[in-house]
Image (tube, rainbow, N blue to C red):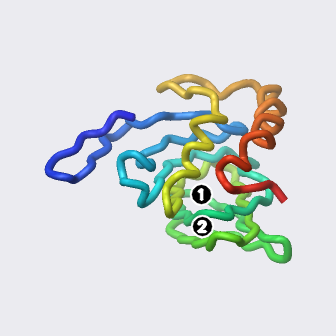
Amino acid sequence: MSFEEFEGIVHIPPKTGPARWVFGDHYTIKADKENTNGSLGLIEAMVPPGGGPPLHIHHDSDEAFYLIEGELEISNEKRRQIVGTGAFVFVPKGKVHAFKNVGDEPCRMLIIFTPAGFERFFTELGVAAEEGMPAPEAAQYAADVEKAQNIVARYKAEYV
């Protein structure tokens, strides 16, 4: 990961960090286990309309979302709620959840994992997303689902 450190402070310049396509969503890892001493993982995400993961649970990390622009449906096994630009959502470890872009435009958000570690899931699963590179064909998503099922347990999470 490209980052600068000065006097113990980590700076990630704009448009840097490993970028991956995962299920058609674009994820850029801005902070990870290595550059935060395991404290947190931070991902900048662009989720197209209809995009987002299925219900899942993190057994070892809390997850938070800050929606920069767009609309998301946040859900668990019993309830769904639409949240918009400026919303913050915190999901403690052990809670089943999912999100889905229910708007007509891509949504942008920050995803935080504490402690760090789950951000590596995106690096391992995803397809490289270089600047200006289009999303993989939809056929790739089926392969992503199968691969995700095989690796998610390594990151102490599971699909429900």
Image disc number at residue 70 = 1
Q: What x and y, as percent, mark residue 42? A: 46, 53
* Residue 15 shown left or right of residue 63 in the figure: left
Residue plotted at (85% across, 76% down)? 78
User: Which quadrant holds the C terminus?
Assistant: bottom right
In the image: residue 44, left or right of residue 12: right
Distance from the alpha carbon under mark 1 to that under mark 2: 6 Å
Q: Is 155 located above or below residue 21 in the figure?
A: below
x, y percentage for residue 51? 72, 47
* Residue type for callout 1: Gly
* Residue plotted at (58% across, 71% down): 89
Q: Which residue is denoted by mark 2 in the rendering?
A: 84
Sequence-wise, the earlier of marks 1 and 2 is 1
Circle 1 crowding by C-alpha within 10 Å: few under 14, some 14–19, many from 20: many
Mark 1–mark 2 contact, CB under 8 Å?
A: yes
* Percent coordinates x, y for residue 119 in the rendering: 55, 48
Q: How many marks?
A: 2
Residue 121 lies, with reference to residue 85, above or below; the image says: above
Residue 105, disc? none
The residue under label 2 is which amino acid type?
Answer: Gly
Q: In this orientation, which residue lies closer to the viewer: 44 or 39?
A: 39
Which class describes the residues within 10 Å of circle 2: few (<14), some (14-19), or many (20+)?
some
In the orientation shown, which residue stands out farthest toward the left? 7
Q: Secondary structure at mark 2?
A: strand
User: Could you tell me residue 92's position as x and y percent?
Assistant: 62, 73
Image quadrant containing the N terminus:
top left
